[in-house]
Image (spheres, rainbow, N blue to C red):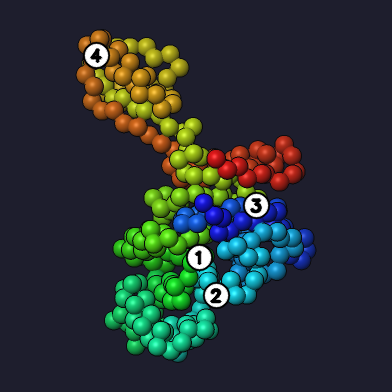
Amino acid sequence: MAAVIDIQDVSKSFRRKVHALRGVSMQVDQGQIFCLLGPNGAGKSTLVKILMTVIRPSVLSGSMLGKPIGHKPTLRRIGYLPEHHRFPSFMTAGQALHYYGGLTGMRRPARRRRVEEMLELVGMTSWRNHKVGTFSKGMQQRIGLAQALLHDPELLLLDEPTDGVDPVGRREIRDLLLQLRNEGRTILINSHILAELESICDQLAVLVKGRVAMEGTVDALTEGGVNWSVSYRDASLEWGDSKIEQLEDRIVVTLPGDSLHQVQSTIDRIRDAGGSILAVSQNRESLEDLFMRALKQAGTEDAASPGAVRGRKK
């Protein structure tokens, strides 16, 4: 699978020695939804702006869509939604999309068709002739996403795409992103809203203090956090080191690992003791748990060594 974004050792320092990025290396493969996560101030938006040549890096090596970062013709093949985008408030939604379509070099007949298609795609057709300045934050985000898709890009860079969008709109945007991925597009999403991303990420990287603290697929990164819970009653058993939770009407034993054989043995043991099985469930570490683990791990490694926390891809 070809790498659409392949960067190595990206660093950025601002004045007064503020180190926004400290040797970031990352690879985004074709047809993926790649989620760039991290707390506020981690360097996520700075990295996206470097890829779009909005900010000049201190150090950069790598490529995007097979060309060096900053190759101007390649930028026309990318759709970009900035975090704090601003459309001219006096323009209507339709005028704003025509304006930005013109900036990408689209001819007027193609713009007319695509503007209508994109307004319908993001649920803003009925607002076509309303001024952008009257829109809510969520409505402006929808127009921003339409703008990013207008010229039919191969790669999308989306900085906080669901910021300010209501729950229905967030779900619609997630469904749209999955549709775009299934069409073969590659999508890089920068966000700190973990619940929005868990169901759509193919791969992720967690940035902490300008470094990649963790990188890989969600399944691979949470593999060690899989366990099983067995709920039962009417049996008195000792479980050694296994985690036990005594509830009012049941006992829950948590089994580490992903062994079905161990689960079956536990069920057999409970039944042999005269117990009744109430529920069996598999639990996997959530994206929020993974995120907190990355923060803790980065803090521990920082304390042990001042060097960069290296990204790990599984």
Packing grade of label 2 (10 A; few <14, some 14-19, many >=20) is: some
Q: Mark 2 points at which residue?
A: 76
SS at mark 1?
Answer: strand
Which residue is more in the foreground, 296 or 220?
Answer: 220
Packing grade of label 1 (10 A; few <14, some 14-19, many >=20) is: many
Give how far apart the Cα atoms at labels 3 and 2 are: 24 Å
User: Residue 274: x percent and y percent?
Assistant: 22, 11
To which quarter of the image does residue 210 belong? bottom right
Identity, as a three-letter code, of the amino acid under mark 2: Arg
User: Residue 253: x percent and y percent?
Assistant: 35, 22
Give how far apart the Cα atoms at labels 4 and 1 are: 55 Å
At 44% from the left and 51% from the top, the residue drawn is: 201
- Residue at the far right in the pictured view: 16
- Do the numbered discs 3 and 1 sit on residues whose CB atoms are within 8 Å? no
- Do the numbered discs 4 and 3 sit on residues whose CB atoms are within 8 Å? no
- Residue at the far top in the pictured view: 273
Q: Residue 155's mark?
A: 1
User: Residue 43: x percent and y percent?
Assistant: 62, 58
Q: Earlier in the sequence, mark 3 or mark 2?
A: 3
At 58% from the left and 53% from the top, the residue drawn is: 27
Q: Residue 271's mark?
A: 4
Give how far apart the Cα atoms at labels 2 and 4 are: 65 Å
SS at mark 2?
Answer: loop
Q: Which of marks 2 and 1 is nearer the N terminus?
A: 2
Q: Earlier in the sequence, mark 2 or mark 4?
A: 2
Give how far apart the Cα atoms at labels 2 and 1 are: 10 Å
Identity, as a three-letter code, of the amino acid under mark 1: Leu
Which residue is more in the foreground, 154 or 281?
Answer: 154
Q: Is residue 298 above or below residue 53?
A: above
Q: Which of marks 3 and 1 is nearer the N terminus?
A: 3
